[in-house]
Amino acid sequence: MQTIYRLLICCILANALSLETFAQRSAILNYGNLIAAMPETREADTELKAYEQSLIAKGEEMAKKFTADVDAYYKKIEQGLLSPSEQEKMGAELEKKQNDIKRYESEITQKLEIKRSALLAPLVEKTTN
């Protein structure tokens, strides 16, 4: 009986040692990391940053002009050069400019997202094909 157990154990060991270990043949791929590692991504990032800087420069220019207009408005009020109706009219114009600046700030985010998608779309397509 003992020899049967020994023979059975030897067969099991021989079988276990002779079997190939089956490894998974799939891997988890993080597209974000893959795309970030591509050289084309650096070019796209550079272009996107330049576009962002141009949008920000326009926004800063709008803000500087608005600040100058507000300063001029308050100087005219202090000097008594504006009637109440003119003050109201200029105040409404300044408020409109301020709203335009706020709207432009939100447009910057949208424009950057559209540009980013346009620049990265070919890279995403390249990785999926």
Image (cartoon, grey):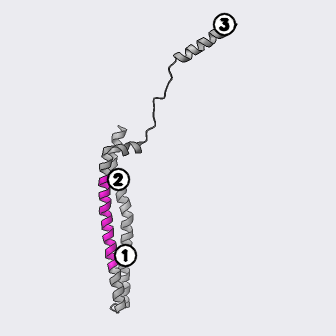
Residue bounds of the magenta highlight? 45-68
Q: Which residue is mark 3?
A: 3
Q: Which residue is mark 2?
A: 116
Q: Which mark is residue 127?
A: none
Q: Secondary structure at mark 3?
A: helix
Front in this rendered view, residue 114 or 46: 46
Residue 52 figure quarter: bottom left
- Which circle, 2 or 1, is nearer the viewer? 2
Question: Would you say 101 lies left or right of 5 here?
Answer: left
N-term mark: 3 or 2: 3
Quadrant in which the C terminus is drawn: top left
Task: Give the residue displayed 36% in from the left and 67% down from the top.
Answer: 104
Task: Give the residue displayed 31% in from the left and 44% down from the top.
Answer: 39
Q: Which mark is residue 96?
A: 1
Q: Is residue 89 magenta?
A: no
Whether 94 is drawn above or below 48: the answer is below
User: Tags 2 and 1 in contact by the CB under 8 Å rule?
Assistant: no
